[in-house]
Amino acid sequence: MSNNTVFVNVYETERRYGGAEEGGWYYTCGTPVVSKATTCVESESEYVHGDLCPAGHWESILSAKYSNKSEYAYSYTHDANGVNYLDTMDVPTEFPGELVTSGSYEIRVEDHPGEEYPAYRPHYE
């Protein structure tokens, strides 16, 4: 076993509308909000995140802090006058790149500091 430097990254995720092709499709974007450099015990090429693993320790702490923090984006569910589209059922037509939801958090143990993803906006092929 050896110690490896890893990063426990917390990403705020958003769902965006990709386009109308094939009945409509969505993609997930992530923006790093925390990136904690630490070590991880490696065994048989897989990370072990037990009680004795520093990465596991930080993953647990950050998971407790950021779990269940999901909500619809206010700008998507409300118009400029504050009328809630979910109350009126008059949801506007979506356009590519439009923010659909935000406020969810994802925690990953990675070999690099947190980076925004995807690097490029996906497109229909």
Image (tube, rainbow, N blue to C red):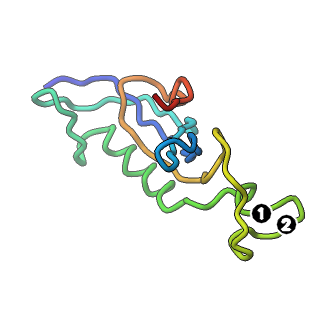
Q: Name the image quarter holding residue 82.
A: bottom right
Where residue 93 sits in the image (x, y, percent)? Answer: 69, 54
Q: Name the image quarter holding residue 91.
A: bottom right
Where residue 6 sits in the image (x, y, percent)? Answer: 35, 27
Q: Which residue is mark 1?
A: 78
Is 56 on the left-hand or right-hand side of 24?
left
Question: What residue sits 49% from the left and 62% below the top?
Answer: 68
Q: Nearer the viewer, residue 79 or 50?
A: 79
Compared to 122, does 48 lie above or below?
below
**Residue type (three-letter) at the residue carrying disc 1:** His
Q: Which residue is mark 2?
A: 82
Q: Rate crowding at label 2 as few (under 14), some (14 to 19) or many (20 or more) other CA atoms within 10 Å.
A: few
Compared to 13, does 7 lie above or below?
above
Q: Rate crowding at label 1 as few (under 14), some (14 to 19) or many (20 or more) other CA atoms within 10 Å.
A: some
User: Do labels 2 and 1 touch, CB within 8 Å?
Assistant: yes
Question: What residue sits 45% from the left and 49% below the top?
Answer: 62
